[in-house]
Amino acid sequence: EIVLTQAPGTLSLSPGERATLSCRASRSVSNFLAWYQHKVGQAPRLLIYGASSRAIGIPDRFSGSGSGTDFTLTISRLEPEDFAVYYCQQYGSSPRFGGGTKVEIK
Amino acid sequence: EVRLVQSGAEVKKPGEFLKISCKGSGYSFTDYWIAWVRHMPGKGLEWMGIFYPGDSSAKYSPSFQGQVTISADRSTPTVYLQWRSLKASDTAMYYCARQYGYCSGGNCSLNYWGQGTQVTVSS
């Protein structure tokens, strides 16, 4: 079973700052890696699929990179609505989510 | 417009049976995998399993194999998640979600999500 480790657990930033979130897989998932945003009281929202492709309607301040075992989600300039929990998910085999990174207001 | 509408919140006792639902509309129901995802209070998202209505294939995460059953009724068209005997530890929000794009053998990313069904199990 492939384990996803997300870091950091919590990221404290101010609006306008850049956020860099990491997701590491215990073995290669090729580019079968997605990122989701999850806010309290809402369903998760797909941001990135295929490691680097933005889903429909996702602003271009969100970008994904990486392949194999190391992946990054970057939010270029944080907007107030971006403060949330972010999860990576691998779908190379036996899909699984990472533990999440909470992006909170500093 | 693609929509997944889930059944309402449930309050049950340990040992009881429960079946919650996820009704799809706005797309070809038999052509897309539907997954169930658990979110326990204060915890992360967990992939439970996934179902393909086209051929009734079901694949479960090892942690949930034997604990839940996923099924579907193509006529309604609805996907179900059921427990034969609930435990207090099943208390969580449960989401259904539809595959997005390329998906091989149930290994999918998910873009359309239901609103969630809160399940509370307490004596």
Image: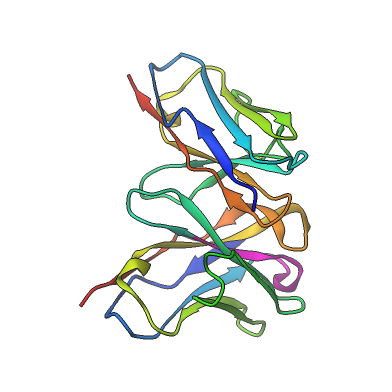
Q: Is residue B30 magenta?
A: yes
Indicate left or right for B12 with B104 as reference: left
The answer to whether residue B1 is visible is no
Identify the residue shown where x is 56% and y is 18%. A76
Q: Residue B16 falls in which quadrant of the image?
A: bottom left
Please check the rendered image and state whether residue A29 is part of the magenta-colored stretch, yes or no. Answer: no
The total number of labels drawn is 0
Is residue B72 depicted above or below A90 in this figure?
Answer: below
Q: Does residue B30 appear in this view?
A: yes
Residue B78 against residue A14 in the figure, above or below: below
Question: Image quarter for residue B113?
Answer: bottom right
In this view, A75 is above or below B41 = above
Q: Is residue B18 above or below residue A19?
A: below
Q: Residue at x 38, y 16 (%)?
A: A14
- The residue range painted magenta reads B27-37
* Percent position of residue B32, x then y: 72, 65
Please provide percent x and percent y for residue A43.
46, 52
Where is residue B57? Give x, y as percent: 72, 76
Q: Residue at x 76, y 39 (%)?
A: A31
| Rendering coords of residue B5 (x, y %) | 50, 67
Q: Quadrant of the C terminus of chain A?
A: top left
